[in-house]
Image: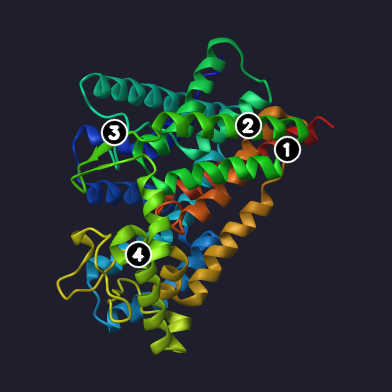
Amino acid sequence: MKILNVNLKLNLAIILIIFFHDLFLSIFSIHPKVSYSIVFLLYFLVVFFNRNTMLLRIDRWLFYVLIVLMPSVLVGLYLEWSYIDISADIVRYLAPFLGYVAGVILLKQLDYDRILYTFYVLLAIQLILYYYSLISKASYVLQGGPIVEYASLHGLEVQTLFFLIVYFLLKNKVVSGFKKVLLIGYAAGFILNPIFLMSKARLIAVLLTFALIFILYSNIKDKVLMILFALFFAGTSFLYFDGRTYYDKETSSDVTVYSRIQNTIELVKSKKYLADASTSFRVAEITNLTGMLYDKAPYSLFFGFGSGALYYDDYAKIEGGIVQENFRPDGGVHDIFFVPVAYVFRYGFIGLFLMLYFIVHFYRKILINNTNLHQNGISKSLKIFIIISFVADLFVGVHIYGNFDFGFYIAFAIVLQNKFNVRYNSLH
């Protein structure tokens, strides 16, 4: 076996550190904000201090981002927002672009087989983390903890992208034996996790994942099987959990698995804020943001209120559904959950359009290849992952906005595809 040179070993080590920084940093109990800063610094060093990268030949995506961020920063400074909040919003917007460029720099130096091998190493580590979380969950339940617990720390370690990879590995029949059993177990955990955590957002992500697979990449036989499985799963879960109550530490009351869905339905019927404070808060957020943008139009539509901008509940009162840490001393709120409006509010429509162009451009650039099952599965997985990430950011802005990994995964797809095309063309 050919020994990897020092640069390739370093690249592979950096890739593993980037993807599992949460695991490494949690060992030292580092504060999440400090952890995020360390990860940003790591990506920044990869991009701007790589010996193959010169500032004069800056990547075009980073050039576009810097152009968009300049007026946002200037407006933020003019309106005297907090320097910390301004810095946070700069990094959040930059994150997926920086992740993409760093991924290209690290991966383009590897050949096709090593990139594919690295991707499956990431999957193997994810499986280890998942089964460790499954054992922890089982131990927690055996010690008297509830199976179902809202926003619990005892959830299962599953990710949408890796579920998609698992699904297409199984569908394309490229694994067998014990490996197949492990992958099936991971798929089961992905489906059950939203129920264990009573999470509406995760449940929507699971349903959307299967809907996209069903619509985009299923033949008639697969569609029938998926419908039968969905009916079976829905029926059995309803029969098992119907009437069972669990203690919710956050509300100090007994709830059912479907309480949060029932609360949303009650909100629609009664229009009472506290019927579902989480959903009501998001409605109030959008109302306040659009109200502020409308009042300062048209310049606010082009430049927003700048990086670090706060919004206030002058148009719709906020009566709950958000943690106190999101409020600033003057009563303003910084974190925004509905990300499309967040882009306009902080970076103007120019900032929103650049992000949408980035997403659509690479979605269209990832091509499905039917000559190689591994390439086929990865391409399909990443195309669905892009759609789900965009939809998920409508509820919680952590999937694309502020997420370095999103851009890095796109780099995986693009570089791997380019390497495959070179190999395929050289054989024909």
Camera-nearest label, 3 or 1: 3
- Identify the residue shown where x is 62% and y is 46%: 383
Q: CA distance from mark 1 to mark 4?
A: 52 Å
Crowding at dot 4, Cα within 10 Å, few <14 / some 14-19 / many 20+, comes out as many
Q: Where is residue 17 drawn, in percent x and y?
A: 37, 35
CB-based contact (under 8 Å), mark 2 and mark 1: yes
- Identify the image quadrant of the C terminus: top right
Residue beneath disc 1 = 422
Q: Where is residue 424 drawn, in percent x and y?
A: 77, 33
Q: CA distance from mark 4 to mark 3?
A: 37 Å
Camera-nearest label, 1 or 4: 4
Q: Which mark is residue 158?
A: none
- Identify the residue shown where x is 56% and y is 28%: 166
Pick the residue in front: 274 or 149. 274
Tag count: 4
Q: Where is residue 167 drawn, in percent x and y?
A: 59, 30
Residue beneath disc 2 = 112
Q: Which mark is residue 280?
A: 4
Q: CA distance from mark 2 to mark 3?
A: 28 Å
Residue 289 in sight here: yes
Q: Tell me the amino acid under the disc marked 3.
A: Phe
Q: CA distance from mark 2 to mark 4?
A: 48 Å
Q: Which mark is residue 24?
A: 3
Marked residue nearer the N-terminal end (3 or 1): 3
- Which residue sits furthest right? 428
Marked residue nearer the N-terminal end (1 or 4): 4
Provide the secondary structure element on which disc 2 rests.
helix
Camera-nearest label, 2 or 4: 4
Quick check: 44 above or below 191? below
Pick the residue in front: 378 or 340. 340
